[in-house]
Amino acid sequence: MTVEADHVVVEGYTLDRPTAPGIEITGHDITVENNTVTRPPGGDGLRFFGTDLKILHNTILRTSNRYGHADCMQTFADDTPPSRRVLIEGNRCEGIDNMCLMAESPHDGEGDGHGHSSDLTIRDNYCETLKASRTLMFEDVQHATVTGNTFGAAIGLAIHSTGAHVSGNKASPRIHYEVGIDASSRPGCTGPRPGGAP
């Protein structure tokens, strides 16, 4: 399912083995709510680009790295707009081979260099990652708020992902530290003491 429009609500769909990404949205003021995406072959469950986006109470199951990099959710900047003011709340990512969220801004070294991604709120989500060393990864994404989530791998902050706020998450006791960060991302970061590299 692909949405390229403004002021849209995508609600109540069930997609079993859809072409990856299962859902892709690009635009302003889009809500994706109460959908289920299962086993998207060879890719991500959901991709998002744009401003004032809400991703709420969706279930994404069993993304596989068998044919490529497969996250639960992803945003990046390769001929796509940056993502700003995004709320990701109450979602369940289960059986995910790669990350629950990979967020890359245009200036991460691979993007097209237009604009900045910022102000992503990731709240009260459940994230089960099977193979990735990071549950959430931010590259050149400013002012991310990560709170109240349950996950089994660390959060990575890299390439000027400044101003992050991390609090109240339930991390697996098997991980050595909740936050990995590089020197460029330390300004304005609050939360658990970083334990190593992103």
Image (tube, rainbow, N blue to C red):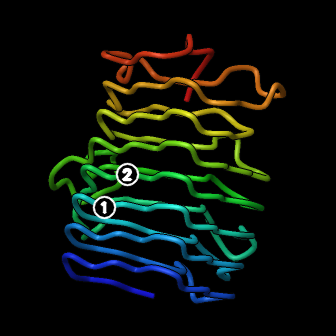
* Quadrant in the picture for the C terminus: top right
The picture places residue 64, in percent across and down from the top left corner, at 73, 70
Q: Residue furthest left?
A: 115
* Whether label 2 touches label 1, CB < 8 Å: yes
The picture places residue 148, in percent across and down from the top left corner, at 57, 34
Crowd rating for badge 2 (residues with CA inside 10 Å; few <14, some 14–19, many 20+): some
Query: In screen coordinates, is 5 left or right of 62?
Result: left
| Residue pointed to by mark 2 | 87
Q: Residue furthest top?
A: 193
* Quadrant in the picture for the N terminus: bottom left
Up the image or down, 21 lies above or below 69; here it is below
Query: In screen coordinates, is 106 left or right of 173?
Result: left
Label 1 amino acid? Leu
Q: Which residue is more in the foreground, 114 or 8? A: 8
Label 2 amino acid? Leu
The picture places residue 58, in percent across and down from the top left corner, at 56, 67
Q: Residue at x 61, y 89 (%)?
A: 18
| Residue pointed to by mark 1 | 53
Instruction: Kindly state the secondary structure of the residue where label 1 is placed.
Output: strand
What distance separates the C-alpha of mark 2 from that of mark 1?
6 Å
Instruction: Kindly state the secondary structure of the residue where label 2 is placed.
Output: strand
